[in-house]
Amino acid sequence: MRSREYDLDFRDRAARIRAWGIGLLAVAGLLWTWCAVLLLTPYEVDREPGDRYPDQCESRLLTDRGTANEGLYKGDHCANERDWPEALAVLGLSIPVSVTGVALFTTGAVSRRMSAHAEAMRELDRIADERAAARSR
């Protein structure tokens, strides 16, 4: 295999690695969004299946009166519906996904840049050799 063919193949592999990194970062972004929805949006809770008038609950994070956090003590159904462990599990799952995505994206991008740099250096060497050969004639 000639060096140019090898270099093009190397760049294609680097582009695929970078694309995987972008994909994993997109998945991590979706997980962060899901966590934000769980923590920041108000929600409804049915007291029993098929309830026509569900209870209105405040968001877990931005609650003033404590319907989401202190509702269990008052017999409120909001406290049991959205628990902190679910949101934290989603956030915890996003960490290795995002770290892997950043690593793959960085590896792919740096590999492509190094390949382009090496090609530019070979081209500059070729031009310098041609000039040196032209001067010696």
Image: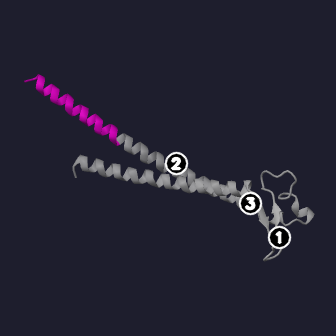
* Mark 2 residue crowding within 10 angstroms, few (<14) / some (14–19) / many (20+): some
Q: CA separation, marks 3 and 1?
A: 27 Å
Q: Of callouts 1 and 2, which one flags the residue occurring earlier in the amino acid sequence?
A: 1
Q: Position of residue 108 (x, y in %)?
A: 42, 48
Look at 79% across and 77% down and name the residue there: 49
Q: Is residue 53 magenta?
A: no
Q: Which mark is residue 102?
A: 2
Q: In the structure shown, which secondary structural element does the residue marked by tag 1 occupy?
A: loop
The residue segment tinted magenta is 115-137
Determine contact: label 3, label 1, CB under 8 Å. no
Q: Quadrant of the C terminus?
A: top left
Q: In the structure shown, which secondary structural element does the residue marked by tag 2 occupy?
A: helix
Q: Position of residue 82 (x, y in %)?
A: 76, 62
Q: Main secondary structure of the magenta part?
A: helix
Q: Which residue lies under the disc numbered 1?
A: 53
Look at 81% across and 68% down and name the residue there: 54
User: What type is the residue that disc 3 sits on?
Assistant: Pro
* Mark 3 residue crowding within 10 angstroms, few (<14) / some (14–19) / many (20+): few
User: What type is the residue that disc 2 sits on?
Assistant: Val
Q: Which residue lies under the disc numbered 3?
A: 85
Toward the viewer: 50 or 77?
50
Residue reaching furthest to the front: 52
Q: Is residue 132 magenta?
A: yes
**Residue 74 horizontal side relative to residue 32, left or right:** right
User: What type is the residue that disc 1 sits on?
Assistant: Tyr
